[in-house]
Structure formats: structure tokens, C-alpha cells
Image (cartoon, rainbow, N blue to C red):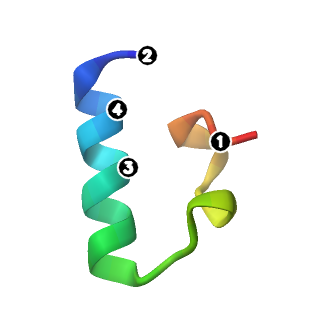
């Protein structure tokens, strides 16, 4: 996984309050 994708996922979770398991598929969450 690229560093940009990881950073984007961290920022997404931090700004939306979303749980890690509820990340959109674009971040590679399973």
C-alpha cells in the first residue's frame, strides 16, 4: 500500500470520526 493512501486514510478517519472498519473501499479496507 502506498504511503499516500495510508495518510489519506488517517486524515479521513481523523476528520470524519469514521471507524477504521468503516473506511470506504478506495482505502483498501476489508
| Disc 4 to disc 3: CB gap under 8 Å | yes
Marks 3 and 2 sit apart, C-alpha to C-alpha, by 11 Å
Label 2 packing within 10 angstroms: few (<14), some (14-19), many (20+): few
Label 4 belongs to which residue? Answer: 5
Marks 1 and 2 sit apart, C-alpha to C-alpha, by 11 Å
Q: Is residue 25 left or right of residue 7?
A: right
Label 1 belongs to which residue? Answer: 29
Marks 2 and 4 sit apart, C-alpha to C-alpha, by 7 Å
Marks 4 and 1 sit apart, C-alpha to C-alpha, by 11 Å
Residue 1 got which mark? 2
Upstream in sequence: badge 1 or badge 2: 2
Marks 1 and 3 sit apart, C-alpha to C-alpha, by 9 Å
Q: Is residue 18 left or right of residue 9?
A: right
Residue at horizontal 66 percent and vertical 44 percent from the top: 25
Label 3 belongs to which residue? Answer: 9
Upstream in sequence: badge 4 or badge 1: 4
**Quarter containing the C terminus:** top right
**Please, what secondary structure does the residue beneath circle 1 have?**
loop
Marks 4 and 3 sit apart, C-alpha to C-alpha, by 6 Å
Label 4 packing within 10 angstroms: few (<14), some (14-19), many (20+): few
**Please, what secondary structure does the residue beneath circle 4 have?**
helix
Amino acid at each position: 500500500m502506498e504511503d499516500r493512501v495510508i495518510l489519506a486514510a488517517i486524515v479521513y478517519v481523523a476528520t470524519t470520526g469514521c471507524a477504521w472498519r468503516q473506511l470506504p473501499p478506495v482505502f483498501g479496507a476489508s
